[in-house]
Image: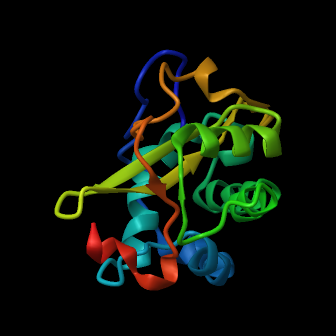
Amino acid sequence: MPQILGTKGPIYCNRSLLFDPEEIDSIKNDLEAKWKTVDDEVNSSSIWQASWERFGTCGVTVDQLNDQFKYFNKSMELYDKYNMKRILSEANITPGNNYTAQGLLDAVESGLGKRARILCSRDRKKKNHYLLSIYTCFDTSFNLINCDEISNFLTNCPLKKPITYPNFDENFINKV
């Protein structure tokens, strides 16, 4: 998601650039494997549409992102290059176990050489916290940068409570 130093956003930069699923037909299988929702009731295409309309339309000023195909293709390229499952696994962080926010941040920083941003979700009934997403940050040339150079916080996760790295095969989202 594009972001300007010290701000939220931008978002929805050009509402005339409508999502066209045919533009990404050639990479649809990759998208379904790598950019999917963990909620079985949400259509993947609607997730891609929301991402394009909210964030992709703001990236079109960068040549490597100046159309829908390039935006999603570059996302898949970065997903492969900075594979968080691999980075966490190399730090002995495995799905289904609990970790601290600092432990997760340290593991990602060790694997990337840069500070990332992690977000959590909370199960209000059980009062458990789950790792929801890990964001890596880049400059407009796609060089990794520290996320705290852009955002004033690295996590919304509780610092003193355990955080579950969910096993997405369990469809954990229905529990949250």
Percent across and percent down for residue 76 are: 70, 63
Q: Is residue 60 above or below residue 132?
A: above
For the point 42% across and 41% down, the residue is 157
For the point 69% across and 32% down, the residue is 115
Nearest the viewer among 111 and 39 is: 111
Percent across and percent down for residue 118 are: 53, 43
| Residue at the extreme left of the image, as rendered | 125
Give the quadrant of residue 145: top right
The scheme the figure's colours follow is rainbow
For the point 65% across and 42% down, the residue is 136
Q: Is residue 81 above or below residue 145?
A: below
- Number of numbered discs visible in the structure rendering: 0
Percent across and percent down for residue 47 are: 41, 66
Q: Quadrant of the C terminus?
A: bottom left
Task: Please indicate whether residue 9 sits to the left or right of residue 150 in the image.
Answer: left
Nearest the viewer among 58 and 97 is: 97
Res 94 seen here: yes
For the point 69% across and 38% down, the residue is 106
Nearest the viewer among 91 and 131 is: 91
Res 13 seen here: no
Task: Please indicate whether residue 108 sits to the left or right of residue 121 in the image.
Answer: right
Give the quadrant of residue 156: top left
Q: Is residue 16 above or below residue 155?
A: below
Give the quadrant of residue 161: top left
Percent across and percent down for residue 175 are: 28, 73
